[in-house]
Structures are given as C-alpha cells and as structure tokens.
Image (cartoon, grey):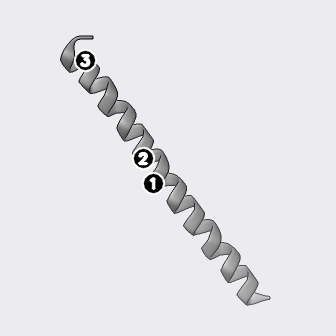
Amino acid sequence: MGKEINFFIFGTLAFCNTNAKIQKYFSGRKTGILRSNLWHGS
C-alpha cells in the first residue's frame, strides 16, 4: 500500500512539474510575441 501511495505522489509531482513547464513555455511565447509586436509597432 505504501508503494502505491508513493507512486501516486511521484506521478502527481511529475505531472504538476511538466504542466508548470508547459505553461511557462506558452506564457513565455505569448509575452515574446507581444513584445515583438510592440517593438515593431504593429
């Protein structure tokens, strides 16, 4: 039973970590697009 709980916690942490990285990547791309639009004045 302890093994299952550990596996569940590990899986949840890994999923949250990956999700955070994906969100960071997309928000970074969004701000990059906004910045380049402002920079080029379009």
40 with respect to 21 (left or right): left
Frontmost residue, 12 versus 25: 25
Given contact means CB atoms under 8 Å apart, are the residues at marks 2 and 1 in contact? yes
30 with respect to 11 (left or right): left
22 with respect to 11 (left or right): left
User: Element under label 3?
Assistant: helix
In the rendering, which numbered label is found on residue 21? 1
Quarter of the image where the N terminus is located: bottom right
| Amino acid carrying mark 1 in the image | Lys
User: Element under label 1?
Assistant: helix
- Residue to which mark 3 is pinned: 38
- Dot 1 crowding, Cα within 10 Å, few <14, some 14–19, many 20+: few
* Residue occupying the point 19% across, 19% down: 39
Q: Residues under labels 2 and 1: Cα distance?
A: 5 Å
- Residue to which mark 2 is pinned: 24
* Residue occupying the point 48% across, 46% down: 23
Q: Position of residue 41 (x, y in %)?
A: 22, 11
Is 10 rendered above or below residue 24? Answer: below
3 with respect to 15 (left or right): right
Q: Quadrant of residue 32?
A: top left
Given contact means CB atoms under 8 Å apart, are the residues at marks 3 and 1 in contact? no
Frontmost residue, 42 versus 16: 42
